Image: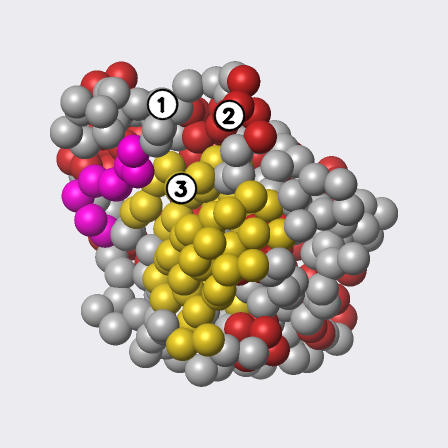
């Protein structure tokens, strides 16, 4: 499946909320768009997912114009400022319960406990969501957004505003894409540079440019494809300077991860994630805990928080 935006523009009361933008992304791939805060990130996320009607231009799903409700059913927006971000006063357990309920899943205390246990977050259930590390927050919210099996596209809006290493939330996006989802990640230009994109700081007219595509990657391929930007050397064959290859990209090219191979049929995903039954083994027959296990070696949160796709029922922005 593919979502395509052609000449999409959103007018504001005084200035445009989003300048004319062209963009396309498909299931099974990560798309990184970079731009300065306040110059179209929220409008782009809402227009691309059918939550806002553009002033001009078209949004198509698989080449056909569809009603906004049909597009909303296939998409989810994650942590959009002022739209889908959770209240900072909520605890992690509260956020999980709400996310499961919005995805049409059972959200009783026992269901929340099992969801957290499966991801190694039991000890953090009482923390306020604003106390979570930025990468953990993004991974949790993305996993909840994909609990609905109808969701095929996910938008992660400015995960870098919560701090942390950019490679952490980018790896979360890659893992989601490897499961067959189409993932659009919005970030600032400085965060894009942290990920190895050869993108100069915004100056002059570029301060007001809409978010632009700077990387397109299909997990499992030898190396990501970096989109050329207008400020780059036109004589460059790839649109990327030699300094743009980061240690992270080099490792991806030389040692591709077996865990991130995309499915040959991205759309053929399980309709429902089967919850594991509770363990009914009597206490005296259960295996004893191994005292020599180092709990600090648990799998990183962004590698474990991939769940079945999910619906986001948040409605249109003001």
Query: Is residue 74 positioned above or below 127 on the image?
Result: below
- Provide residue 118's location: percent of width, then percent of height: 54, 62
CB atoms at circles 1 and 3 under 8 Å apart?
A: no
Of badges 1 and 3, the one in the foreground is 1
Extent of the magenta region: 220-228
Main SS, magenta residues: loop
Looking at the picture, tell me which residue is in the foreground, 82 or 59. Answer: 59
Q: Residue at 34% x, 40% y: name it.
A: 215
Alpha carbon of mark 1 to alpha carbon of mark 3: how far?
13 Å
Q: Secondary structure at mark 3?
A: strand
Say which mark, if any, is on residue 123.
Answer: none
Which residue is label 1 attached to? Answer: 231
Q: Secondary structure at mark 1?
A: loop
The answer, for residue 90, to whether it is visible in the render is yes
Who comes first in sequence, dot 1 or dot 2? 2
- Provide residue 96's location: percent of width, then percent of height: 69, 62
CB atoms at circles 1 and 2 under 8 Å apart?
A: yes
Which residue is label 3 attached to? Answer: 213
Say which mark, if any, is on residue 206.
Answer: 2
Q: How many marks?
A: 3
Would residue 91 be found to the left or right of residue 133 on screen? right
Looking at the picture, tell me which residue is in the foreground, 231 or 225. Answer: 231
């Amino acid at each position: 499946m593919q979502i395509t935006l052609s000449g999409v523009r959103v007018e504001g009361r005084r200035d445009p909320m989003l300048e004319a933008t062209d963009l396309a992304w498909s299931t099974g791939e990560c798309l990184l768009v970079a731009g300065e805060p306040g110059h179209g990130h929220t409008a782009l996320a809402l227009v691309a997912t059918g939550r806002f009607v553009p002033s001009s231009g078209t949004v198509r799903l698989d080449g056909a114009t569809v009603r906004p409700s049909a597009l909303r059913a296939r998409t989810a927006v994650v942590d959009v400022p002022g739209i889908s971000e959770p209240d900072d006063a909520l605890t992690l357990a509260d956020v999980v319960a709400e996310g499961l309920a919005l995805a049409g899943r059972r959200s009783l205390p026992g269901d929340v406990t099992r969801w957290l246990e499966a991801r190694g977050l039991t000890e953090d259930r009482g923390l306020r969501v604003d106390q979570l590390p930025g990468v953990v927050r993004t991974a949790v919210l993305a996993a909840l957004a994909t609990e609905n099996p109808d969701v095929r596209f996910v938008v992660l809006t400015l995960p870098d505003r919560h701090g942390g290493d950019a490679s952490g939330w980018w790896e979360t996006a890659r893992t989601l894409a490897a499961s067959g989802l189409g993932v659009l990640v919005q970030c600032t230009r400085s965060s894009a540079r942290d990920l190895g994109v050869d993108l100069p700081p915004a100056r002059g007219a570029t301060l007001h440019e809409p978010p632009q595509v700077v990387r397109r990657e299909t997990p499992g391929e030898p190396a990501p494809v970096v989109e050329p930007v207008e400020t780059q050397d036109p004589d460059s064959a790839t649109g990327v300077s030699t300094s743009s290859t980061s240690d992270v990209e080099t490792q991806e090219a030389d040692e591709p991860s077996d865990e991130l191979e995309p499915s040959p049929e991205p759309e053929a995903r399980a309709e429902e994630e089967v919850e594991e039954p509770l363990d009914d083994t009597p206490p005296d027959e259960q295996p004893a805990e191994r005292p020599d296990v180092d709990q600090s070696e648990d799998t990183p949160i962004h590698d474990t928080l991939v769940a079945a796709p999910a619906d986001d029922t948040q409605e249109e922005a003001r």
